[in-house]
Image: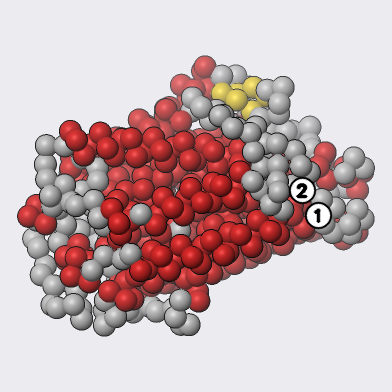
């Protein structure tokens, strides 16, 4: 039922009817913590050390701060408009259909990739016991076998089934799993410090043996950005929270504060627990005989067989929990895209438990398809991080626009300092993309272009009225993305002058260095931010989109 606006001073948001308000304060916090502590903690400590050495500790801190800035932006938006799939909905309110489709498509695609990547992490850690699931390629990554592919699809099905059973069951299940994960990580950190402590590892080959550029590269490449961006779940489940105005800021900020502390402590414990002889070939050659599970491999080196067994058990539980969360998150994103009028309306159908079950089914199918081009954990991570950064970038610009469109709108959580923090968050999103490198960004660009092709086809074939394109208001988004692609192509984040091989073009060989490339990203992002704010929808149109949707009021479409 439509809730009419009360003038442009204050607009009542069109809430999602049919969704169940079963997500409590603790459950909302744990959806964030559970998503952040997934497969990233199982592999991130090793991969970050290989890339940046002891300076990987700074990578975890810097990555956490950058994502915190983005999270604070979404805390303001989500408390204003507590709707399901908010990361897709907010750009629609401020800029209309064209902008919301671009960010919504790439956000949905990246989220759809997370559940299969968590499945791969589970199977990789199980490999020492069930070797027919995966095999190690000559290039290094573990790849699925044919029987492993069947098991992977079966796990995807289980996650989807639990989500269809209802959000109340999901949150209870998730709460238990998060307590387990936190307990295991705490035990691991304590045991690593107790079993062996070699503080000289922090400086024996230099604190930053690969240079400070490697500190930045590790954020997307080692899965650091991928891990922290799980904060988004407090936004995606906002429409199902029992008290969103209080619960959302608590969950967003709390999940990041907790996990930044966890990951930094884990990285320090991992580095100082390494026997010095393992570093004789340098940090980049650090490896263990148990290559499928680095933390379990370190536990075996230290003689803690029981700890290795516990970690392998947790390697099934931790990714499974995150995969379960993202199976639900992705379905909320397709639901939100459909509420915007950009996806088919059958994706908004709810079952008796208030779950958009066609969206869950679509998530399952797309997730299984991802196993084909990305059959290993490492091949997924950079793409997901870059795509998430692009999708989150629309939030800071939406904050700037909505403050000008609806200055009198109640904001239970408002960032101080005017445009300063949204600008920092927007620049941070741009840097996460730049640091991913051309080889990753080219794939993300192809995925976005494919999305625009789907968008055109849908607009010509849809049998229902669609919202106006609002092309001018949304044009800043593709300008931003394509500008970042140009900077990425001419960047040289590793400082080695070597080309990164892409699918169609080889790039990332200069002349922009890590520093000049970051400066270019910052200047370009500031320009695009104010361009987007200037091109925002008229206040009346924004108010219409907030208070009414094409699903409930087709007269505002077409």
Residue 327, quarter of the rendered image: top left
The answer to whether 20 appears left or right of 304 in the picture is left
Quarter of the figure that contains the N terminus: bottom left
User: Going 44% across and 57% down the picture, which residue do you hit?
Assistant: 392
Report which residue position mark 1 lands on: 211
The answer to whether 98 appears left or right of 138 in the picture is left
Helix, strand or loop at label 1? It is loop
User: Going 56% across and 19% down the picture, which residue do you hit?
Assistant: 145
| Residue 170 in sight | no
The image position of residue 535, as x and y in percent, is 33, 64
Question: Which of these two is toward me, 400 or 74?
Answer: 400
Q: Earlier in the sequence, mark 1 or mark 2?
A: 1
Report which residue position mark 2 lands on: 495
Q: Which mark is residue 289?
A: none
The answer to whether 7 appears left or right of 532 in the picture is left
What's the CA distance linking mark 1 and mark 2?
10 Å
Q: Nearer the viewer, mark 1 or mark 2?
A: 2
Seen in the picture, residue 149 relative to 44 is either above or below; the reply is above
The answer to whether 126 appears left or right of 254 in the picture is right
The image position of residue 105, as x and y in percent, is 36, 44
Seen in the picture, residue 432 relative to 537 is either above or below; the reply is above
Q: Residues within 10 Å of mark 1 (few under 14, many from 20)?
A: some
The image position of residue 220, as x and y in percent, is 61, 49
- Asked if disc 1 and disc 2 are in contact, CB closer than 8 Å, the reply is yes
User: Going 41% across and 65% down the picture, which residue do you hit?
Assistant: 531
User: Going 91% across and 48% down the picture, which residue do you hit?
Assistant: 276
| Residue 433 in sight | yes
Question: Which of these two is toward me, 313 or 225?
Answer: 225
Colour scheme used in the picture? secondary structure
């Amino acid at each position: 039922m439509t809730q009419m606006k009360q003038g442009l001073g204050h607009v009542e948001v069109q809430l999602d009817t049919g969704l169940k308000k079963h997500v409590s304060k603790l459950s909302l916090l744990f959806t964030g913590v559970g998503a952040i502590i997934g497969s990233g903690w199982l592999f991130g400590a090793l991969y970050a050390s290989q890339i940046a050495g002891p300076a990987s500790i700074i990578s975890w801190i810097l990555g956490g701060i950058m994502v915190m800035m983005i999270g604070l932006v979404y805390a303001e938006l989500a408390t204003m408009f507590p709707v399901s799939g908010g990361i897709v909905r907010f750009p629609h309110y401020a800029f209309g259909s064209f902008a919301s489709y671009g960010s919504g498509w790439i956000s949905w695609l990246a989220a759809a990739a997370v559940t299969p990547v968590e499945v791969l992490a589970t199977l990789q850690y199980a490999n020492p016991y069930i070797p027919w699931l995966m095999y190690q390629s000559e290039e290094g990554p573990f790849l699925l076998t044919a029987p492993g592919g069947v098991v992977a699809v079966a796990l995807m099905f289980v996650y989807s089934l639990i989500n269809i059973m209802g959000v109340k069951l999901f949150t209870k299940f998730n709460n238990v799993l998060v307590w387990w994960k936190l307990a295991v990580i705490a035990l691991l950190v304590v045991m690593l410090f107790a079993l062996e402590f070699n503080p000289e590892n922090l400086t024996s080959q230099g604190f930053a043996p690969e240079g400070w550029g490697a500190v930045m590269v590790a954020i997307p490449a080692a899965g650091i950005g991928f891990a922290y961006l799980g904060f988004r779940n407090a936004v995606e489940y906002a429409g199902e929270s029992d008290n969103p105005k209080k619960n959302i800021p608590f969950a967003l900020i709390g999940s990041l504060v907790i996990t930044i502390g966890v990951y930094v402590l884990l990285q320090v414990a991992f580095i100082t627990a390494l026997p010095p002889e393992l570093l004789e070939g340098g940090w980049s050659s650090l490896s263990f005989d148990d290559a499928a599970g680095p933390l379990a491999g370190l536990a075996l080196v230290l003689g803690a067989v029981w700890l290795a067994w516990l970690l392998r058990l947790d390697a099934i539980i931790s990714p499974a929990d995150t995969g379960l969360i993202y199976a639900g998150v992705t379905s909320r994103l397709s639901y939100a895209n459909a509420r915007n009028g950009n996806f088919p309306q059958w994706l908004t159908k709810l079952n008796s438990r208030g779950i958009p079950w066609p969206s869950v089914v679509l998530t399952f199918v797309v997730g299984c398809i991802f196993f084909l081009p990305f059959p290993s954990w490492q091949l997924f991570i950079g793409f997901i991080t870059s795509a998430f950064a692009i999708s989150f970038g629309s939030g800071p610009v939406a904050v700037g626009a909505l403050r000008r469109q609806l200055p009198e709108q109640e904001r239970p959580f408002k960032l101080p300092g005017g445009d300063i923090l949204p600008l920092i968050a927007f620049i941070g999103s741009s840097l996460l993309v730049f640091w991913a490198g051309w080889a990753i960004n080219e794939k993300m660009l192809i995925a976005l272009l494919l999305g625009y092709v789907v968008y055109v086809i849908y607009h010509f074939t849809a049998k229902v009225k669609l919202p106006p394109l609002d092309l001018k208001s949304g044009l800043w988004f593709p300008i931003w993305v394509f500008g970042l692609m140009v900077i990425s192509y001419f960047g040289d984040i590793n400082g080695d002058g070597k080309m990164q091989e892409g699918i169609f073009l080889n790039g990332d060989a200069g002349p922009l260095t890590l520093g000049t490339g970051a400066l270019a990203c910052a200047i370009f992002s500031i320009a695009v931010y104010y361009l987007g704010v200037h091109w925002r929808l008229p206040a009346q149109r924004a108010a219409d989109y907030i208070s009414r949707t094409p699903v409930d009021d087709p007269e505002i479409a077409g």
